[in-house]
Amino acid sequence: MAFLKVSGTKIVDQNGEEVILRGAGLGGWMNMENFISGYPGCEFQIRAALADVVGKEKSELFFDKFLEYFFQDEDAAFFKSLGLNCIRLPFNYRHFEDDMNPRVLKPEGFKHLDRVIDLCAKHGIYTILDLHTAPGGQNTDWHADAGTHIAKMWEHKDFQDRVIWLWEELAKHYAGNTWIAGYNPLNEPTDPYQTRLIDFYERVYKAIRTIDPHHALFLDGNTFASDFSHFGDAYKKWENVAYSIHDYSVFGFPSAPEEYVSSDLQQHRLRRSYEKKREWMDQHGQCVWNGEWGPVYARQEYEGDRTEAINEERYRVLKDQLNIYNKDRLSWSIWLYKDIGFQGMVYVSRETPYMTLFKDFLAKKHRLAIDAWGADDSQVRDVYQPLIDLIKKEIKPEHQNLYPAPVWKLTDRIGRLARNILVSEFLIREWAEHFKGKSEAEIDEIAKSFAFSNCLHREGLNKVLTDNASLVAQAK
């Protein structure tokens, strides 16, 4: 078996035949996220809090067993049964080095990553390695695991140097693995000056290519993989490179401006949003990969009788996006494979020890809207509205929309800082204290809640994905 590679606008195999990668992201696994697994704040915060509450040994037991149970052979077999052929593997740099001991490789960092790559290969599934969290934070959101809305990676060269070092170590380790479709060096960067990202890509390209000349690279656009306006003719320096967009649609979220009925105008808006993101690639004849996309879904405990109708609307968005992608023969990775019930293809049953233990806490999180992703702030909107009104009144209009606007609007920024950072910090200890007094056996059972056998299937989503897994337009 030979490496996949990028040739013009296509991904091809050793015979030059087109390969369309279709799959999902294993979000919430080696880069945990609050809305995916139910904790508040950032991963580094809950790890520290849990160690403080139950001790280092029990804390490490929980997180190690969580990683083990989250993706096993049963998951890979199910994924393959849907006709999908690629999983994007997001990971946190903290698995490989420590901030207080930088550039010293943790051998255990490869433990679960190797295991899942090998499981996927066993079932004929490609993987794409995605550095989802970089030292200092490469973007302004919670999933950069920095605990702040400032992307410090762009302000400190040493943070960037550490990312280069890490990719050199990863390239050494995986250079010969042909089941890895490629490397995604940096998830959703937000460089307010634009040019620093291009300089970084030049460095990481050279560093990886010195060690590994074979694997394709998938480079995210700036501002959460949406903006390539400053890439210029950088593509001329790079070979075997595809460019990654993240094509989320506002129609797939609670904040949608209107009900999605699949009207001609709404479909046009879907297509236009997607085309704007890939415009630079199309102008220069480059390959596009949609590294993230997909709606979120209603839950019976929160949306009640409206749940089924909301989800049918979200499936319409899903189908219309896939119709666009099929016509363009686009490779994609939907977000995401597994969670606690908001977006995953499979999700943890409410009857499991984890979901039973955290039932009331999760309801509080939802009511307070402390997770940014797909938040419904209707129950606390009146609390924050005076702050929004104050800023609108006292701040000049031209100064109200700070970068990463327009992706973040004024209300989004206030929500990120006031709810998702400030209020969530007060709940971190409360999350950890749920484990107080638990034995090692009980902690193992809590982590085992995330095993495939304890998950339900989002049948509507999976049917749409299966129907579209091999459905592509005829070759042009």
Image: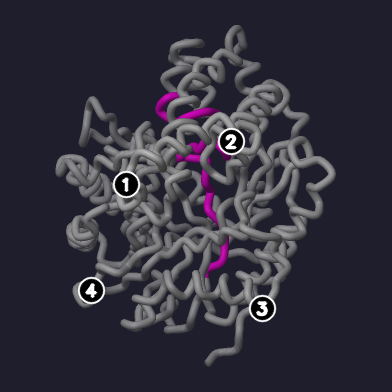
In x, y percent, where is residue 337? 60, 50
- What kind of element bears circle 2? helix
Q: Nearer the viewer, mark 2 or mark 4?
A: 2
Q: Which residue is mark 2?
A: 381
In x, y percent, where is residue 342? 65, 44
Q: Amino acid at mark 4?
A: Gly
Answer yes or no: do the residues labelled 3 and 4 have beta carbons within 8 Å? no
Q: Where, by quadrant of the figure, is residue 467 drawn?
A: bottom right
The answer for how far apart the CA atoms under marks 1 and 3 are is: 38 Å
Q: Amino acid at mark 3?
A: Asp
Q: Which stretch did the figure color magenta?
A: 21-45
Query: Is 149 placed left or right of 370 in the picture?
Result: left
Q: Nearer the viewer, mark 1 or mark 3?
A: 1
Q: Nearer the viewer, mark 1 or mark 4?
A: 1
Q: Which residue is mark 4?
A: 232
In the rendered image, the vertical position of residue 29 relative to residue 58, given as above or below: below
**Tag shown at residue 264:** 3
Q: Residue at x 35, y 47 (%)?
A: 400
Give the mark nearest the N terminus, 3 or 2: 3
